[in-house]
Image: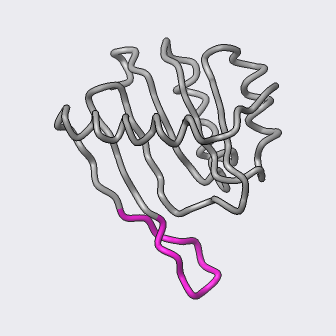
Amino acid sequence: CLNKKNHLRMQVGGEHLFEEPFIKYFRKFLELESNIELIIDTKTNINSVRKLMKEYGDKLDARYFSEETAGTLRNYIFGKELAVNGIKILSESSCEPSYVGTAYVDVEDIEVLNEKFDSLWNLAKTLKI
């Protein structure tokens, strides 16, 4: 998926995405010849996203939701070849939460997730540099 210059669309919570080791992988995506559309659920790391937008220019387009609308759903769509839909399982302890998800390779399923991402994208607030 990565070598085919696929477009990456991500809906994440953003709590840990901008910490090591996750930020390293995110930067690798940005260094490829592909664009990333990113929706974050909270304003927690909004300055980190702005910094990446300045650094990578048009390769990263980001939007966000306010804390009042944040959820536990996570989506990753790699072009038309792969999509992952996951949910964070909230725990009663202060331990790191677990995630469960489904990977999709059927083009029709991926298109459904793309349409849902489009709907969320249109509702989210545009992040300006």
Q: Nearer the viewer, residue 13 or 120?
A: 120
Q: Nearer the viewer, residue 70 or 36?
A: 70
Q: Position of residue 60 (x, y in %)?
A: 63, 23
Q: Position of residue 84 (x, y in %)?
A: 35, 46
Q: Residue at x 52, y 44 (%)?
A: 11
Q: Residue at x 60, y 54 (%)?
A: 13
Q: Position of residue 66 (x, y in %)?
A: 72, 53
Q: Position of residue 55 (x, y in %)?
A: 75, 19
Q: Nearer the viewer, residue 76 or 26?
A: 76
Specify the quadrant of the image occupied by residue 108. top left
- Asked if the magenta segment contains residue 125, the reply would be no
State left or right for residue 111 relative to residue 61. left
The quarter in which the C terminus is drawn is: top right
State left or right for residue 47 relative to residue 126. right
Q: Residue at x 33, y 15 (%)?
A: 4
The quarter in which the N terminus is drawn is: top left
Colour theme: one colour
Report the magenta residues as a range: 88-100
State left or right for residue 100 relative to residue 59. left
State left or right for residue 96 relative to residue 2. right
Q: Is residue 84 above or below residue 98?
A: above
Q: Decide whether the magenta segment is chiefly helix, strand or loop.
A: loop
Q: How many marks?
A: 0
Q: Is residue 57 above or below residue 18?
A: above
Q: Residue at x 36, y 51 (%)?
A: 85
